[in-house]
Image (cartoon, rainbow, N blue to C red):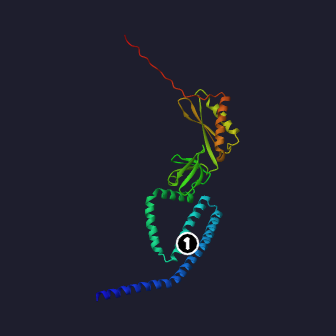
């Protein structure tokens, strides 16, 4: 009796499996058709979304450039908007296939926290880059110097790093996180720049004559701004000579050429006037003690 019941159950299970397979095969064309339609619609949405994203990015770039925004800010906002819009587009397409967007967002959020803890330095540089691009303490082609000793002409402000070109043509890569927290001296913001040239003359030379000679050098140089103060004053009575400061102003873009030329002309003018520039001196007195016999 038991063997007959087992045989009946086995036959019933086989008939059930056959029925399921037959039902699946009957529904397969319809399911494939619906899936194909979803894929086709997703492809259409993706292609249309790409064009819409390009249009939105183009409008954003045009608006920012009309507002005279810095090119670095334009590129940064354009890249950020591109990433955000593509993520939204992918979520929209995925939701058409039955994906739960809430679960995905929670998963992405958890992964973001873990990744953020692992790359704190990079995120700090990213945040610094955003601040530099938005606040714009300097821009490309500005000559800057920070409190960490880095200085040079700004070549490019990127999201994570800023590239500087030093006067001796070296490339310095400065992390934006460090640069955003440093004291920055921007030497290119103002049109005019003051220069100071330090000159030492001997103690036996006449200071009034030296001042007259040096002021004549400033008057003869066309790059020196004559409408701003031109001074020659005693700054220090040093060990080897009298320290004079020659102070004047020039255009920012001609600062270095003017300073180098004036420094050379100051030497020539002092030589022609017979005013000597002292060398460091040190008098050493040696006292000997006679031995008593």
**In the figure, is residue 179 to the left or right of 256?**
left
Q: Residue 208: percent from the left, percent from the top?
A: 63, 32
Image quadrant occupied by the N terminus? bottom left
Horizontal and vertical percent position of residue 121: 47, 56
Q: Which image quadrant for residue 66?
A: bottom right
- At which x and y percent is residue 253? 66, 47
Q: Nearer the viewer, residue 264 or 107?
A: 107
Circle 1 SS class? helix
The residue sitting at 66% across, 33% down in the picture is 213
Q: Residues within 10 Å of mark 1 (few under 14, many from 20)?
A: some
Q: Is residue 276 placed above or below 6 in the rendered structure?
A: above
Q: Is residue 111 visible?
A: yes
Q: Which residue is mark 1?
A: 89
Q: Is residue 229 visible?
A: no
Exactly how many numbered labels are in the figure? 1
The picture places residue 70, in percent across and down from the top left corner, at 61, 59
Q: Is residue 95 above or below residue 130?
A: below
- Please identify the quadrant where the C terminus is shown: top left
Please give left or right for residue 279 compared with residue 119 in the image: right
Residue nearest the observer in this picture, 253 or 103: 103
User: Is the residue 165 above or below the residue 97 in the image?
Assistant: above
Q: Is residue 174 above or below residue 291?
A: below
Judging depth in this view, the residue of 151 and 196 nearest the camera is: 151
């Amino acid at each position: 009796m038991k063997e007959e019941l087992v045989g009946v159950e086995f036959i019933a299970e086989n008939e059930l499996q056959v029925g399921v397979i037959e039902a699946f095969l009957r529904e397969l064309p319809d399911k494939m058709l619906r899936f194909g339609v979803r894929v086709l619609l997703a492809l259409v949405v993706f292609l249309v979304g790409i064009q819409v994203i390009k249009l939105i990015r183009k409008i954003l770039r045009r608006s920012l450039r009309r507002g005279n925004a810095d090119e670095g800010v334009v590129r940064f906002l354009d890249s950020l908007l591109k990433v955000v819009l593509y993520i939204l587009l992918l979520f929209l397409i995925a939701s058409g296939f039955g994906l739960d967007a809430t679960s995905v967002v929670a998963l992405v959020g958890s992964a973001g926290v873990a990744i953020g803890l692992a790359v704190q330095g990079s995120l700090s540089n990213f945040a610094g880059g955003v601040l530099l691009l938005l606040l714009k303490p300097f821009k490309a082609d500005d000559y800057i110097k920070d409190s960490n000793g880095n200085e040079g002409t700004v070549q490019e402000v990127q999201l994570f790093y800023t590239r500087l070109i030093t006067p001796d043509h070296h490339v310095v890569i400065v992390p934006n996180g460090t640069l955003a927290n440093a004291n920055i001296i921007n030497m290119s913001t103002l049109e005019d720049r003051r220069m100071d040239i330090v000159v030492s003359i001997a103690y036996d030379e006449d200071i009034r004559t030296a001042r007259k000679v040096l002021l004549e050098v400033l008057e003869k140089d066309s790059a020196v701004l004559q409408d701003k103060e031109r001074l020659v004053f005693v700054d220090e009575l040093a060990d080897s000579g009298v320290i004079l400061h020659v102070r004047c102003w020039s255009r920012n873009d001609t600062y270095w050429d003017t300073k180098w030329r004036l420094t050379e002309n100051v030497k020539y003018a002092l030589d022609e006037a017979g005013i000597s520039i002292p060398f460091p001196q040190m008098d050493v007195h040696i006292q000997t003690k006679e031995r008593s016999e």
